[in-house]
Image (spheres, rainbow, N blue to C red):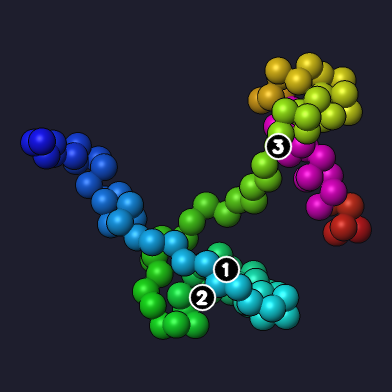
Amino acid sequence: MKQRKLPDKWQSSVRAAKAVQVAFDMDEALQYQIRREALDNGLSPSDQIRHILTLPTADKPKRPRLTVSLSPEDYVHLAERYGLQPEQQLEIKHRVMDELLSYSQSLDK
């Protein structure tokens, strides 16, 4: 089978695609310590581990974001909460973001 050349815009992703993710089972105290240090240093837990191991990390900071997985049942629950239809996933996402911002602002008071 003939190998096709990857488009130029995908070339930078080749190294990342070849990387292997390694998971470590650690006790909760160590996980907490690494996550806490990562937060204090403005790093992801993965980058904090790379820092501890003196491995290189990306110079460019990643976009800070948090993720949560939402099941179809979660969308039903959130739609009821916000008075929307479960299919209005983008609007639900906006409402969740507004609620999280309100939560954050309430902690600052």
> Disc 2 vs disc 3: Cβ atoms closer than 8 Å?
no
In the image, 1 versus 64, the foreground residue is: 1
Q: How crowded is mark 2: few (under 14 residues within 10 Å), some or many (20 or more)?
A: some
Residue drawn at x 8%, y 36% as measured from the top left: 2
> Disc 1 vs disc 3: Cβ atoms closer than 8 Å?
no
| Label 3 sits on residue | 70
| Label 2 sits on residue | 49
Residue drawn at x 55%, y 72% as measured from the top left: 24
**Circle on res. 64:** none
| Label 1 sits on residue | 45
Q: Tell me the distance, in whole angstroms, between the alpha carbons under discs 2 and 3.
A: 28 Å
Q: In this view, does 54 lie above or below 105?
A: below
Query: Helix, strand or loop at disc 3?
Result: loop
Query: Helix, strand or loop at disc 1?
Result: helix
In the image, 68 versus 97, the foreground residue is: 68
Residue drawn at x 85%, y 59% as measured from the top left: 108
Select label 1 or label 3 by which is in front: 3
Instruction: Give coordinates of residue 87: x percent, y percent.
Output: 71, 18
Q: What residue type is labelled 3?
A: Leu
Magenta run includes residue 99: yes
Q: Tell me the distance, in whole angstroms, between the alpha carbons under discs 1 and 3.
A: 22 Å
Looking at marks 2 and 3 on the same chain, the residue that comes earlier in the sequence is marked by 2
Q: Which amino acid does label 1 sit on?
A: Pro
Q: What residue type is labelled 2?
A: Ile
Instruction: Give coordinates of residue 1: x percent, y percent.
Output: 10, 36
Instruction: Give coordinates of residue 94: x percent, y percent.
Output: 71, 31
Locate residue 109 relative to residue 66 in the image: left or right. Answer: right
Query: For residue 39, which quarter of the picture?
Result: bottom right
Residue segment shown in magenta: 92-104
> Disc 1 vs disc 2: Cβ atoms closer than 8 Å?
yes
